[in-house]
Amino acid sequence: MGARKHSQPRRGSLAYLPRGRAKSMEARIRAWPRSDSEEPKILAHCGFKAGCVQVVSIDDRDKAPNAGKQLVNLGTVLATPPVLVLGVRGYSKDHDGLHAEFDVYAEDIPKGVAKEITLKNKEGALEDAEKKIGRIKEVFAIVAALPSAAGLEQKKPYIFEASVSGGDITKQFDHVKELLGKEIKIDQIFETGARVDVAAITKGKGWQGVIQRYGAKKKQHKSRKTVREIGSLGPISPQYVMYTVPRAGQMGFHQRIEYDKRIMIMGNTEDSKIKINPKGGYKHFGLVKGDFVILKGSVPGTYRRLIKLRSQIRNAPIKVIKPNVLEVVV
């Protein structure tokens, strides 16, 4: 009985299942917020994780015990170069889900990006797409993020879809059509003080045992042949190991989405009054050049990894309050 008592993990073992390796270095976003605004807007951008700083700010939460006082919080710096709008995609919807009806791509796409996609543009593709607008339920912008624009060595771009919300379908299609072939900066999508959801692939930690992976308690000395194994694999019946039993396996390199990360600072290293680069640059990243954001708190993933930013999907406030940032300690 003593071993069985120690077999249960200390923290929630079933929070995320399965705990397998992510299939791609690029996280997927499967749900998107809906806007009541009449003006259409692209709902996502991305950046590359550079490092961490300390952000000194005034607590602007009215009902918090520290309201009006100085707070020092962890901040994560993301290099956010502009993303290139490659195309527009329309989806119809039925009982089987969404179905892509058309893709319309920009005419002048850089060679390094064009070779990564299958261009389906034909003569009159734009006119054909406009004829199908009546049965379109959702419009997405196809965008490309270039790691080289953030100062990284990787040449292969990340290409993903970003939902468009606000107004009717025709307005959304026209909005993306005007942006085809152009770059959009992060300040065209988000503003300082807004909260975003971040999607990324976490740090990989390889194969780990049940103690490290699930936080199960070690057995007592000499209680069994092993100390760091789980005490019991379950009852005698049913005659199989249930999925709820903690086991050793892959830890880390999982896809995760974290909600409501506040944008504390948004700017450009050339004209920003706040210095964010430490002497010699960030470890494993270097100097951040160009556009950047500082998010309050931590962000999944290791340095140099792609971080997708999505408009807040939970508890979006009516009004965005800009934070009162006093200092950034690098």
Image: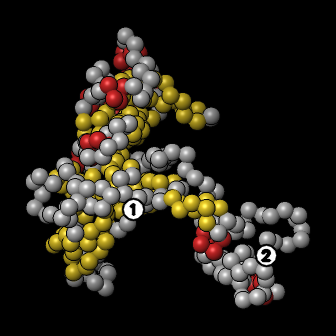
Q: Position of residue 237 (x, y in %)?
A: 89, 68
Location of mark 2 (residue): 232
Q: Is residue 53 left or right of residue 250?
A: left
Residue at mark 1: 299
Q: Is residue 70 above or below residue 189?
A: below
Residue 111 in picture, x, y percent from top left: 32, 25
Question: Which three-letter amino acid code belongs to the residue tagged 2?
Answer: Ser
Disc 1, SS: loop
Judged from the image, the secondary structure of the residue bearing numbered disc 2 is: loop
Answer whether labels 2 and 1 touch (C-beta < 8 Å).
Answer: no
In this view of the protein, can residue 36 be seen by the observer? no
**Closer mark to the observer between disc 2 and disc 1:** 2
Quadrant containing the C terminus is bottom left
Residue shown at the point (29%, 35%) measured from the top left = 84
Q: Nearer the viewer, residue 152 or 57?
A: 152
Residue 46 in sight in this render: yes
Determine whether 74 is above or below 152 in the image.
Answer: below
Label 1 crowd bin: few (<14), some (14–19), many (20+), radius 10 Å: many
- Quarter of the image with the N terminus is bottom right
